[in-house]
Image: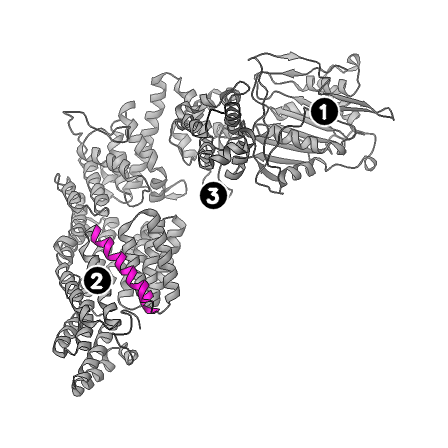
């Protein structure tokens, strides 16, 4: 019997590879597209004798098979088997009644849904072929054309089914309800599979669901259809493939040999295709058809996203056509919102982002975009706010559609979005900078979208830089310096490419318009815009970045470009100046300047910046030999930061305070604080500060005698710093690790680490860290019996650290000089060095260091025959210093410095 079928011009028949197996109610799959293209808009009816197999059974039953041929299917996985099992989960023929029609279907229903081009139809069609034996009475198929402008009606689909089951044209009922009832009656006693491809809505498919328990219904749709009054249903969401499976899709169509020859380029192609199966199939088919077209050439074609959509088409199918069908099915408001949101740089999306482009509550439009899979819901039920994700290729496609709108309409929406960014970023910044709240008449904002201010700014940093570049283009120029100022308030929190943010701060500090390009160049004769507060903030941010690169001269030059415009800016700039000049002017001078800045911030009640200044002041006081005062400063800073609930700042202060406690030999407390800081940095994903904390914790563990733990920590830190390309920290870790090797008597590796560290610090021009490293070289000479060789490097260290005002390091160097002179029999020189070291240790209340140094001094006195003085010192220290009783057997010429 000829069967009437209709085929619309589309790239909508998709299918694919199966991924991410889950045996729960929701499964995730992915695949590639195998679609059939015809002339645009053409609809026709054709005989399908090849596609419909009618077999006369011996019992007189008819077997109808309307499925297309089995598709090419790569990556057969457990989920494909699970889908087959779900389709086969029907009652055997002799276990269900042969008469009666129930209102609630007992058929097994599986809805396979997902984005255009994700692989729905191929997965479904492949699975349908695998379960043929489970349906001895036939497999019905209809393309409901839900992705086109003229979906097939339920009535037409039912007529097709009834005639396929032997009902004469004259006996087909006139109404949809009667047709549905007759179909359910016929199917009640049959075991058939009904394949409803490209369904549009629940209303379209509800009449097509048979009631019989021996039937199964397989539905594909770009929407997650509820199906209606169906008890036994499962939802299968077609997701994007993982990298390995995406590579398999490309290999299937391009040829395994082609991909195997250049796997790295193949991975790049997969990324440019966004793992979308239809895109991978189109690219693979082009490569297979063109042996002269290399993978590298194809990668070049795909690199520019402005031309990527046009590249993803061939004679048979087109990604643009595939996406356009869904786009045109959206409401006008949904189309406008999708196009506007696509203009933002890629990243996390929340209702706040959609609200930027929508005057009213956009939740209806968001629901529509999620239901049609144009936007993915990325969050979970426990998230504080919903989050969404826009596929890169859909973003490029939607931006192209948005680009055809009149410029003024596009600029109006973009202007509103940029101004929204500025308002929000300033409110978050005002939580740290009280003058912003006053000047801008905004209420400070602690958090947004479930993220604290610094986390939100870090997540949005790329978009803020982009908005600054676009602001003048769309008439929102006033927003640009405010955005840059807000970003500057979080300069320590933003993981953005340094060059891009540096360019932004430079142009804002100079009063020029930021450029949308990578390197803005203000036009000749440009007059600085009157945003002094923003310029102040950006100059400080620049100085912070330059100081971090050890370009202190440039940092100070930026700070001194212009006088600060308000007392807050002046106090914050003085904090930076004090920190930057600590190496040039010495720690003592820096401590005085920082103390004055702290008092200014107290008077202003600038709490956030006061905490930052107190942390730095604590470090300076520790270095100049006042660790107890340093601890008090850092504990006050930590208490202030707790008010802000800032995880990153709290973690940094815990690490700094842990180091200060380590200096005081309160090692257990130090280890606890450093462990807490490490956990915070892991949670934040901040690898640089994780590595710094591994380094600090390694030093504490070494002092506790846990050498293997210390070595593991140093090795972790070293790997991260090497990956990040941070030579200064690489050198510091080599210096610290050498002490562990020395404690393990592995002097070859200890010397090797010291040599590496010295070379790095010399190349970096860092005299102080060169001196810190040289101090341990001196001890290695002592430990290996080369006492004379130890004198010159240790004397150099003592001079360098004294000039820098680093009292603790100077004392440590003089302590080792005392040991070297003692071992050489230079008792007078040894006495001088021991007494100088102990004076510093006593003044700074370094009790453990004082005890260790005194024990070696006592050894020297006894070697020199000064037993009475040695006894007096011993008796005094036994009473006054709790660490001294544990020093009885300690010999600094043998024991690694800082270890018991």
Q: Is residue 545 left or right of residue 564?
A: right
Q: Earlier in the sequence, mark 2 or mark 3?
A: 3
Name the residue at 33% across, 47% down: 724
The CA distance from mark 1 to mark 3 is: 43 Å
Residue 756 seen from this side:
yes
Q: Name the residue furthest right.
A: 59
Disc 1 residue crowd, few under 14, some 14–19, many 20+, Cα 10 Å: many
Marks 1 and 2: in contact by CB < 8 Å?
A: no
Where is residue 642 drawn, in percent x and y? 32, 53
Task: Specify whether 375 is left or right of 584.
Answer: right
CA gap between label 2 and label 3 equals 52 Å
What residue did someone put label 3 on? 383
**Would you say residue 746 sits in the magenta stretch?**
yes
Q: Which numbered disc covers residue 153?
A: none
Position in image of residue 291 (x %, y %):
50, 25
Please identify the quarter of the rendering in which residue 354 is found.
top left
Disc nearer the start of the sequence (2/1): 1
Residues drawn in magenta: 741-763
Q: Position of residue 265 (x, y in %)?
A: 44, 34
Residue 198 as seen in the image, left or right of residue 889:
right
Residue 846 part of the magenta-drawn span: no
Q: Nearer the viewer, residue 2 or 269?
A: 269
Q: Residues within 10 Å of mark 2 (few under 14, many from 20)?
A: many
Characterize the magenta stretch by its predominant secondary structure.
helix
Q: Which residue is mark 2?
A: 774
Residue 94 at what x, y percent from top left? 83, 36
Q: Quadrant of residue 533?
A: top left
Which residue lies at the image location 40% right of the left edge and 35% below the top edge? 347
């Amino acid at each position: 019997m000829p069967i009437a079928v209709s085929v619309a011009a589309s790239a909508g028949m998709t299918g694919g590879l199966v991924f991410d197996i889950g045996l729960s109610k929701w499964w995730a799959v992915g695949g590639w597209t195998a679609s059939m293209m015809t002339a645009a808009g053409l609809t026709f009816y054709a005989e399908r004798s090849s596609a419909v197999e009618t077999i006369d059974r011996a019992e007189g039953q008819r077997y109808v098979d309307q499925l297309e041929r089995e598709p090419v299917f790569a990556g057969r996985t457990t989920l494909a088997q699970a889908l087959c099992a779900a389709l086969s989960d029907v009652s055997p023929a002799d276990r269900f009644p042969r008469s009666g029609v129930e209102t609630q279907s007992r058929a097994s229903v599986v809805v396979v849904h997902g984005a255009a081009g994700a692989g729905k139809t191929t997965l479904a069609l492949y699975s349908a072929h695998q379960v043929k034996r489970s349906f001895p009475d036939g497999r019905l198929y209809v393309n409901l054309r839900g992705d086109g402008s003229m979906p097939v009606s339920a009535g037409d689909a039912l007529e097709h089914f009834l005639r396929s089951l032997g009902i004469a044209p004259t006996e087909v009922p006139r109404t949809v309800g009667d047709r549905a009832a007759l179909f359910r009656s016929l199917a009640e006693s049959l075991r058939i599979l009904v394949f409803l491809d490209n369904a549009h809505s629940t209303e379209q498919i509800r009449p097509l669901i048979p009631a019989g328990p021996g039937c199964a219904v397989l539905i594909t749709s770009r929407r997650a259809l509820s199906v209606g009054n169906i008890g036994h249903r499962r939802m299968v969401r077609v997701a994007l493939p993982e990298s390995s499976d995406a590579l398999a899709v490309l290999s299937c169509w391009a040829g395994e040999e082609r991909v195997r020859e250049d796997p790295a380029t193949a991975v790049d192609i997969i990324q440019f295709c966004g793992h979308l199966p239809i895109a991978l199939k189109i690219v693979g088919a082009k490569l297979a058809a063109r042996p002269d077209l290399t993978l590298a050439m194809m990668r070049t074609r795909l690199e520019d996203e402005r031309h990527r959509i046009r590249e993803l088409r061939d004679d048979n199918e087109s990604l643009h056509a595939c996406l356009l069908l869904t786009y045109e099915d959206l409401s006008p408001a949904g189309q406008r919102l999708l196009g506007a949101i696509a203009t933002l740089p890629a990243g996390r999306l929340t209702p706040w982002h959609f609200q930027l482009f929508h005057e009213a509550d956009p939740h209806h439009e968001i629901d529509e975009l999620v239901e049609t899979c144009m936007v993915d819901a990325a969050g979970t039920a426990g998230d504080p706010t919903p989050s969404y994700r826009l596929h890169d290729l859909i973003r490029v496609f939607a931006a192209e559609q948005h680009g055809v709108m009149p410029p003024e309409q596009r600029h109006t929406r973009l202007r509103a979005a940029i101004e929204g960014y500025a308002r929000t970023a300033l409110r978050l910044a005002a939580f740290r900078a009280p003058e912003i709240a006053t000047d801008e008449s905004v209420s400070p904002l602690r958090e947004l979208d479930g993220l604290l201010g610094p986390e939100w700014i870090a997540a949005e940093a790329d978009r803020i830089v982009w908005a600054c570049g676009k602001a003048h283009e769309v008439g929102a120029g006033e927003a640009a310096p405010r955005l840059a100022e807000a970003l500057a308030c979080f300069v320590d929190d933003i993981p953005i490419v340094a060059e891009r943010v540096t360019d932004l701060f430079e142009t804002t500090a100079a009063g020029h318009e930021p450029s949308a390009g990578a390197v803005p160049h203000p036009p000749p004769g440009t007059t600085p815009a009157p945003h002094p507060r923003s310029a102040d903030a950006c100059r400080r941010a620049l100085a912070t970045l330059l100081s971090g690169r050890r370009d202190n001269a440039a940092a100070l030059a930026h700070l001194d470009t212009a006088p600060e415009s308000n007392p807050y800016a002046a106090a914050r700039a003085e904090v930076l100046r004090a920190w930057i000049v600590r190496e040039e002017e010495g720690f003592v001078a820096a401590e005085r300047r920082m103390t004055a800045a702290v008092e200014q911030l107290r008077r202003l009640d600038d709490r956030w910046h006061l905490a930052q200044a107190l942390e730095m002041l604590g470090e300076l006081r520790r270095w100049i030999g006042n660790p107890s005062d340093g601890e008090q400063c850092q504990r006050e800073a930590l208490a202030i930061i707790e008010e802000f609930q800032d995880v990153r700042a709290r973690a940094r202060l815990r690490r700094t305070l842990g180091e200060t406690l380590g200096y005081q030999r309160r090692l257990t407390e130090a280890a606890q604080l450093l462990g807490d800081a490490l956990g915070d940095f892991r949670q934040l994903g901040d690898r640089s500060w994780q590595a710094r904390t591994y380094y600090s914790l390694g030093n504490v563990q070494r002092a506790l005698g846990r050498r293997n733990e210390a070595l593991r920590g140093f090795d972790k830190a070293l790997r991260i710093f090497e990956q990040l390309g941070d030579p200064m920290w690489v050198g510091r870790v080599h210096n610290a690790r050498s002490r562990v090797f020395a404690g393990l008597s592995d002097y070859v590796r200890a010397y090797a680490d010291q040599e590496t560290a010295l070379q790095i610090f010399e190349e970096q021009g860092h005299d102080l860290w060169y001196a810190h490293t040289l101090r341990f070289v001196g001890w290695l000479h002592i430990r290996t019996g080369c006492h004379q060789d130890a004198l010159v490097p240790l004397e150099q260290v003592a001079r360098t650290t004294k000039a820098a005002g680093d009292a603790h390091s100077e004392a440590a160097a003089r302590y080792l000089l005392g040991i070297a002179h003692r071992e050489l029999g230079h008792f007078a020189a040894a006495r001088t060095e021991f007494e100088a070291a102990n004076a510093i240790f006593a003044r700074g209340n370094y009790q453990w260091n004082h005890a260790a140094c005194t024990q070696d001094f006592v050894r020297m006195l006894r070697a020199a025959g000064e037993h009475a003085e040695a006894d007096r010192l011993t008796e005094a220290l036994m009473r006054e210093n709790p660490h001294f009783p544990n020093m009885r057997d300690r010999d600094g010429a043998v024991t690694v410095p800082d270890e018991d």
